[in-house]
Image (spheres, rainbow, N blue to C red):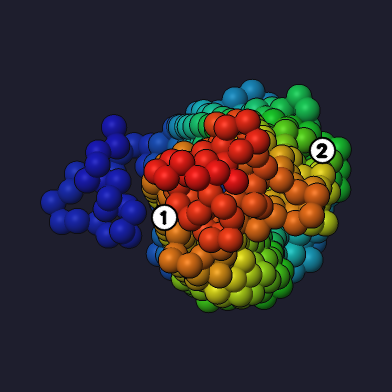
């Protein structure tokens, strides 16, 4: 029996005085031979199958074939280095099921530096360094992995209850790469640098490495702080018969070569395109990207269900890349997207959230967003695709020059938000509007704005759409604009109460061909610009009209002052 005391003593490389002799199945590896140590190490692994093995102190082993770990075995290599020699054309470390078939269970590897020399070579899955297949209960802890060439440093496939923790990489390709089927995988404490994705989920992989495939479920990836020439975390769905389900990505820092988090499809191979992604949570991300190379989250999947993004922190300018980009490579519907608890120091030419023309989102929630500064013409959310139900709440924006909280861009002629609700919004700016939909082909039929204050932003809405606007406790602290700018193809209806505008503000402006109907007395406006609709109301500001200034109501085609009875 392996006692906890014996295990800890072996892991630290010390033998404590008074300890009982090592268990019968504990094997201490011999010192390096100075040549090829493959046979002696594999012989020791075989003798200690199901027991504890510890490397010699500060040993530097050299091998030319895979070291094969049997079921039930704990291998402690703290302080040791194992190098796979050039020309070996194989994995460095693997398990018995890879070589002999069947399944393995309860394998633990602790410590050690595992190095793949330049020019090891091989084909397909042999190009991976640590390769694990068909294992139930796998733990890799405290390893350093170094590769000068070839593919994945740690390759997991067909595993159940795998834990990979406290790993340091200096590798040519991916760090930890998960292929399906995989259930309850835990990845944490990842450091170092990777030449490709630091952590990747591909339920089915590219053709050359497609030895196992299936759903990847209940995965937790956390505490990743590394430098990657690609993504820090990549979550793909694989091909249409596979999926990545119930994935949590938490605590990502460091530097990404393109996007920090990549969600969706790799269209370079059909095997990595079209698989389902659902129940994905990404939180506590504060990593940076190389300038002009990508954003924090890039979602290009063609079969994506529910995604939650929260706790995103961005320091410094963003340049031309959105913080979050939703851009399926082909038209696709995402069931629900949540973007919440976001803090950005500066937005430049790109929006915080970009929804491309190929994207349709069933429900979109944007909540708890703070933007400390923008360049002129920037939007917090730019929707070029379709959103069926949009909720925006608890947003604080400090803007400069024609900036927007929500923009349907003029170049996206078929952009649509079918229902939108904005609440608890604070925007301080110079120009622009809270919401703009400037194209006659845009769709924004229902818009509710409540508990909102704008300062220095002339218009609450700038519309060229047929829109029913409902306001509640809205303050527009600006004298140059007001509630609505209606363009020549727009048709707006305003309802609600609790509307307050700056003294002397215009209230609304309506271009030739446009129309505005008001059912709120608190809209202070020249009523000659309004459509006369029975029961409509406003506060007239044009003293030249015979009804006089003040609260008026339309009966038939006549405006009548509610206190004096004067008509126009």
82 over 366 or under it: above or below: below
Q: Nearer the viewer, residue 279 or 103?
A: 279
Q: Given this view, does label 1 or label 2 mark the residue nearer the observer?
A: 1
Q: Is residue 543 visible?
A: yes
Q: Which residue is mark 1?
A: 500
Q: Residues within 10 Å of mark 1 (few under 14, many from 20)?
A: some
| Residue 118 position in % (x across, y down) | 74, 69
| Residue 330 position in % (x across, y down) | 84, 41
Question: Which residue is pictured at 79% across the width and 54% down the height?
Answer: 512
Question: Which residue is pictured at 67% across the width and 42% down the height?
Answer: 531
The numbered dot on residue 331 is 2
Secondary structure under tag 2 reads loop
The quadrant in which residue 216 appears is top right
172 over 309 or under it: above or below: below
Question: Which residue is pictured at 61% across the width and 38% down the height?
Answer: 558
Question: Which residue is pictured at 64% across the width and 52% down the height?
Answer: 528
| Residue 127 position in % (x across, y down) | 76, 52
Secondary structure under tag 1 reads strand
Q: Is residue 117 visible?
A: no
């Amino acid at each position: 029996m392996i006692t906890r005391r014996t295990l800890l003593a072996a892991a630290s490389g010390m033998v404590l005085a008074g300890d009982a002799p090592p268990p019968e199945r504990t094997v201490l590896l011999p010192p390096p031979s100075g040549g090829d140590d493959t046979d002696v190490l594999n012989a020791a692994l075989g003798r200690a199958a199901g027991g504890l093995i510890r490397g010699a102190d500060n040993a530097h082993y050299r091998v030319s074939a895979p070291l094969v770990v049997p079921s039930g075995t704990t291998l402690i290599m703290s302080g040791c280095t194992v190098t796979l020699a050039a020309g070996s054309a194989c994995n460095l470390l693997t398990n018995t099921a890879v070589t002999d078939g069947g399944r393995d269970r309860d394998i633990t590897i602790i410590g050690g530096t595992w190095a793949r020399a330049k020019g090891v070579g091989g084909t397909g899955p042999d190009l991976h360094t640590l390769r694990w297949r068909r294992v139930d209960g796998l733990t890799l802890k405290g390893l350093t992995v170094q590769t000068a060439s070839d593919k994945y440093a740690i390759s997991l496939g067909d595993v159940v209850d795998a834990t990979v923790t406290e790993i340091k990489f200096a590798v040519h390709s991916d760090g930890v790469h998960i292929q399906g089927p995989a259930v309850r995988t835990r990845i944490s404490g990842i450091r170092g640098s990777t030449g490709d994705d630091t952590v990747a989920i591909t339920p089915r992989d590219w053709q050359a490495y497609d030895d196992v495939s299936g759903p990847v479920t209940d995965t937790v990836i956390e505490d990743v702080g590394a430098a990657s020439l690609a993504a820090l975390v990549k979550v793909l769905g694989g091909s249409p018969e596979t999926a990545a389900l119930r994935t949590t990505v938490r605590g990502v820092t460091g530097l990404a070569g393109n996007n920090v988090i990549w969600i969706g499809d790799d269209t370079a191979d059909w095997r990595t395109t079209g698989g389902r992604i659902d129940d994905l949570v990404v939180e506590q991300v504060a990593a940076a990207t190389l300038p002009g190379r990508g954003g924090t989250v890039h979602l290009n999947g063609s079969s994506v269900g529910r995604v939650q993004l929260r706790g995103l922190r961005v320091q410094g300018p963003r340049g031309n890349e959105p913080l979050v980009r939703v851009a399926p490579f082909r038209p696709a519907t995402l069931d629900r997207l949540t973007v919440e608890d976001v803090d950005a120091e500066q937005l430049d030419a790109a929006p915080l959230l970009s929804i491309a023309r190929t994207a349709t989102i069933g429900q979109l929630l944007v909540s708890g967003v703070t933007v400390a500064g923008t360049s002129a013409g920037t939007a917090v959310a730019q929707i070029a695709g379709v959103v069926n139900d949009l909720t925006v709440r608890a947003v604080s924006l400090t803007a400069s020059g024609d900036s927007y909280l929500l923009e349907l861009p003029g170049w996206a002629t078929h952009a649509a938000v079918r229902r939108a609700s904005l609440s608890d919004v604070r925007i301080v700016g110079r120009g622009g509007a809270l919401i703009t939909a400037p194209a006659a082909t845009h769709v924004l039929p229902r818009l509710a704005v409540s508990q909102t204050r704008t300062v220095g932003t002339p218009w609450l809405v700038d519309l060229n759409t047929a829109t029913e606007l409902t306001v509640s406790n809205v303050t527009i602290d600006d004298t140059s604009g007001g509630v609505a700018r209606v363009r020549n193809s727009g048709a707006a209806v305003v309802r609600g109460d609790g509307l307050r505008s700056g003294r002397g503000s215009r209230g609304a402006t309506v271009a030739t061909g446009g129309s505005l109907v008001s059912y709120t007395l608190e809209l202070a406006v020249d009523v000659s610009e309004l459509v006369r609709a029975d029961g409509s109301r406003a506060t007239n500001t044009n003293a030249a009209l015979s009804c006089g200034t003040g609260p008026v109501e339309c009966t038939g085609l006549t405006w009548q002052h509610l206190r004096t009875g004067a008509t126009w």
